[in-house]
Image (spheres, helix red, strand yellow):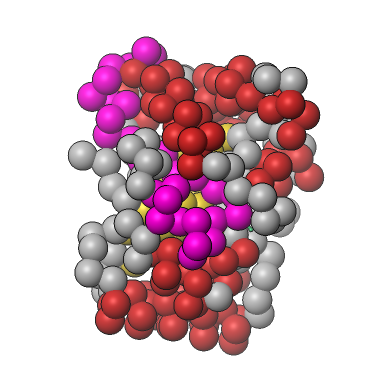
Amino acid sequence: MRKNIAAGNWKMNLDLDAGKILASEVINMTADEVSNDAEVILIPPFVHITSVKQLAGSAKNVFVGAQNCSDKASGAFTGEISVEMLKSAGVDYIVVGHSERREIYGEDDALLASKTKAVLEGGLKPIFCCGEKLESREAEQHFAVNKEQIEKGLFGLSKEEILKVVIAYEPVWAIGTGVTASSDQAQEMHAYIRGLIAEQYDQETADSISILYGGSVKPDNAQELFAQPDVDGGLVGGASLKSRDFVDIIKSF
Ligand code: 13P
């Protein structure tokens, strides 16, 4: 059965000292206060990964993720970081296709499919992001947009491969805006995405994949969002930078 996951995407925030403090607080509070079996994934900037991994040590259910990776294995790609490097630093999950990568850095569906494949071939798990912009939702194109992103990004994978993918639905209009999708809107899209996977693969596969919601998840809305049958957790930005808020979100399952 699929897992409940609370993932904290720190984005490009916090220097190393502040990152270590945040990670230790979350790890300690999680051990003390969280009794459920939800997975917690800390996703710091690349340069903090080794330190955060050391702090996480053998903490139960705490994993470390990366925000991006190259689709290439090695070589003359200045500024890029490979899956193998991330693996050797103790990373378990890699975010692929965050809307900030798609929008600001022009990452297209073909590149994201290639990155997803590279993550899986390296033995790690992709957190594959999809989500529509406000104009697409207003034009009632939101299902079509997410369908295209999922088809182009993921449907080249085998069943064994897609079973290792976590999907994050992050409507762009809800990211960093304080505007959250309603729990009904989130449930509707998550059920739709799960239906696409069932059509392409089969129902059992679709039921085994965790689909996270992202976009202004906070302690005061997490419980209602996570209570939806197809919402298996959250990919949290701003609120993951405050240990108390993030732990309260982890406790919302
Ligand atoms: P916020 O939680 O800050 O809206 O960010 C969401 C996000 O983009 C997580 O990847």
- Residue for point 33% across, 37% down: 229
The one of 66 and 218 positioned closer to us in this rendering = 218
| Quarter of the C terminus within the rendering | bottom left
User: Could you say where residue 233 lies in the image, as x and y percent from the top left?
Assistant: 40, 50
| Quarter of the N terminus within the rendering | top left
- Residue for point 74% across, 26% down: 138
Residue 150, visible in the rendered structure: yes
Task: Left or right? Give the position of 237 relative to 1.
Answer: right
Q: Number of numbered discs present? A: 0
Picture layout, residue 227 above or below residue 142: below
User: Could you say where residue 114 lies in the image, as x and y percent from the top left?
Assistant: 56, 31
Residue 181 falls in which quadrant of the image? top right
Q: Which residues are magenta?
A: 199-226
Picture layout, residue 176 above or below residue 116: below
Task: Left or right? Give the position of 69 relative to 63.
Answer: right
Residue 250 falls in which quadrant of the image? bottom left
The one of 192 and 119 positioned closer to us in this rendering = 192
Picture layout, residue 22 above or below residue 74: below
103 within the magenta span? no
User: Could you say where residue 162 lies in the image, as x and y percent from the top left?
Assistant: 37, 30
Task: Left or right? Give the position of 185 relative to 62.
Answer: right
- Residue for point 42% across, 50% down: 224
User: Could you say where residue 57 lies in the image, as x and y percent from the top left?
Assistant: 32, 76
Residue 64, visible in the rendered structure: no
Q: Residue furthest top?
A: 199
208 within the magenta span? yes
Picture layout, residue 45 above or below residue 188: below
Residue 72 falls in which quadrant of the image? top right
Q: Quadrant of ligand 1?
A: bottom right
The one of 239 and 19 positioned closer to us in this rendering = 239
- Residue for point 22% across, 69% down: 35
